[in-house]
Each structure stands twice: as C-alpha cells, then as structure tokens.
C-alpha cells in the first residue's frame, strides 16, 4: 500500500503536534528539573517511571482524538463505502503511534546520559530494559488509543478505558505488580506497600519490557480486527499476541 506511508507520516505529524502530546512532553521536562534536588532513590525512580504516567496518559488521549478526527468531521459515511480505506487509516494511525515512542526514547536517553555524566548520584543506574519500560508505555498508550477509537468511538469511552486501566494497575500488589503497565522497580518502605522493605523488587525487567511490547502488539491487532473484512486474519494475530502476553507475563515474575 504505497499511500500508507505518507498517510502515516501525516498522522504522526498531527499526533506529535497535538496539544495533549505536547503537554505530556512538557510535564516530563518539568518533572526532570523539579526532581534534580531529590535523593538517590528519587532520581532512580524518576528516570524509570515518570514517562509512563506524565507522557503516556496524555498520548493515549491525543492518539484517540487524532484517530477519531475523521469521524468527528463526518467522514465515516465515506469510509464505510471504502473498507480498504478504513483499514489503511487504522494502519496509519497505528504507525503514527511509533512517533511519540521514538521521541520518548530520545528523551530517556538524554536523561540517562545526564545522570551518567553529571555529578548526580543514582542509587543504582537503571538497566536498559528499565529505561525502555516508560517509552514502551507511551507506545502502548498510542496504540490503545487507536484501538479504543475503533471499537468505542463515543464521547467518554477513552476516559472510561483509562479509569479501568488505572483501577486494574492500582489493585495489583506484591509480585502481581509486574502485570501492570506501571511498575515501581524500587521498594519504598515496609509492608504492605512495599513487601520486603527497602531495595529493589524481584523479577525480570527484561521480560517486563517484552511483556509491554506484547501488549502493544495486542492493542495494534485489536484495532485492525475491527474491520469485518480483515477480522479473521487479525484475530489470529491477536491470539498469537495474547499467547506472547501470557508467556512474557509469567516469565517476568519472580
């Protein structure tokens, strides 16, 4: 589909310039400077966790709004007569979600370089997989926003989806924390909030990054499965992604 890539680039441009995505990037920069005077543990926690919330959540809503722009402009009737065009637009929106991910990766790399070179101590320098977890959440947020836009393109649906996602993540305790999109790799105190006291949680950060990537692929397959003409193919891909989610989710646990 030669027209797919120009469309994806146009969607990526809209997503990167969307006010909500810019807000997420600005919040990331603000929290970076606000945290410079913190403790060693606060520095470690900031660099491994901040991206997921302050950048990921706004990206989810921005991706949803960009992906539903044609619907809100009254273009759904035209696309209904062109199933291939609907599929192409969905694929372009999914590819566009890679753009915020790449920007977040660059931002994380710059922050990691600062902590590595500047006279700022970090309790333990983050592993590559720990640094990648935040940008992968940004990628997953964009892909999930597209998926929700295809299956539930109604006012309030993205907010409800985000509330459910946060509620699920907040209920995870102990080893089950690894199954959430947000993982606090550092323990901050005694039980029950941080079983095991101070230190770092047990489990595999490498497998957690693979788990987040599998969730991203599952969201992408879910969005493409919305079109009946291609549903069988992408449901099959989604099942494979689901198996990967279960396998990597199990492998990351202590």
Image: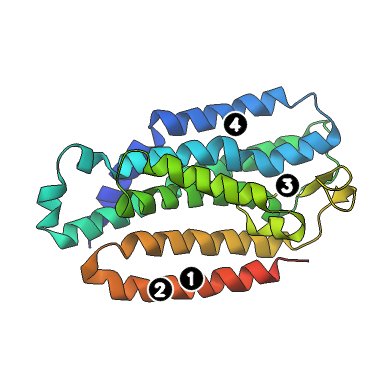
Q: Label 4: state its secondary structure.
A: helix
Q: Which mark is residue 28?
A: 4
Q: Nearer the viewer, residue 139 or 125?
A: 139
Q: Which colouring convention does the figure follow? A: rainbow
Asked if one can make out residue 2 in the rendered structure from this viewpoint, the answer is no
Q: Name the residue carrying label 1.
A: 241
Dot placed on the residue nearer the N-terminal end, 1 or 4 = 4
Question: 190 or 201, which is in the foreground?
Answer: 190
Quadrant assignment for the N terminus: bottom left
Q: Which residue in the protein does label 2 denote?
A: 237
Check disc 2: other Cα within 10 Å, few if <14, some if 14-19, many if 20+. some
First along the sequence among labels 1 and 3: 3
Q: Do the residues labelled 1 and 2 touch (CB within 8 Å)?
A: yes
Q: Name the residue that disc number 3 marks.
A: 184
Q: How crowded is mark 1: few (under 14 residues within 10 Å), some or many (20 or more)?
A: many
Q: What element carries label 3?
A: loop
Mark 4 or 2: the one toward you: 2
Q: How crowded is mark 3: few (under 14 residues within 10 Å), some or many (20 or more)?
A: some
Where residue 86 sits: x, y (%)?
21, 56
Pinpoint residue 124: horizontal percent, then vertical percent.
84, 46
Side of 86 where 177 appears, left or right: right
Question: How many angstroms separate mark 1 from mark 2 (CA)?
Answer: 6 Å
Q: Distance between the residues labelled 1 and 4?
A: 30 Å
Using the image, determine if residue 108 lies above or below residue 19.
below
Q: What's the distance in space between the residues labelled 1 and 3, CA to CA?
A: 25 Å
State which mark lies toward you, 1 or 4.
Answer: 1
CB contact under 8 Å: marks 4 and 2: no
Say which label, 3 or 4, has the lower sequence index.
Answer: 4
The span from disc 2 to disc 3 (Cα, nearest Å) is 31 Å
């Amino acid at each position: 589909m030669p027209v797919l890539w120009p469309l994806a680039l146009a969607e990526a441009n809209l997503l990167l310039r969307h006010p909500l995505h810019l807000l997420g990037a600005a919040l990331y920069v603000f929290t970076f400077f606000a945290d410079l005077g913190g403790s060693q543990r606060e520095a470690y926690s900031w660099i491994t966790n901040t991206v997921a919330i302050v950048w990921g959540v706004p990206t989810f809503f921005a991706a949803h709004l960009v992906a539903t722009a044609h619907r809100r402009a009254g273009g759904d009737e035209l696309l209904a007569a062109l199933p291939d065009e609907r599929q192409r637009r969905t694929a372009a929106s999914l590819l566009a979600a890679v753009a915020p991910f790449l920007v977040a990766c660059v931002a994380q790399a710059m922050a990691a370089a600062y902590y590595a070179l500047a006279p700022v101590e970090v309790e333990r320098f983050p592993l590559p997989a720990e640094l990648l977890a935040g940008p992968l959440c940004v990628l997953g947020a964009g892909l999930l926003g597209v998926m929700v836009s295809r299956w539930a393109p109604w006012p309030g649906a993205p907010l409800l989806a985000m509330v459910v996602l946060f509620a699920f993540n907040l209920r995870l305790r102990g080893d089950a924390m690894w199954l959430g999109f947000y993982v606090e790799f550092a323990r901050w105190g005694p039980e029950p909030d941080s079983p095991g006291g101070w230190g770092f949680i047990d489990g595999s950060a490498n497998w957690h990054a693979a788990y987040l990537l599998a969730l991203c692929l599952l969201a992408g397959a879910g969005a493409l499965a919305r079109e009946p003409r291609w549903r069988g193919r992408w449901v099959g891909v989604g099942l494979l992604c689901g198996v990967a989610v279960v396998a990597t989710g199990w492998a990351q646990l202590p």
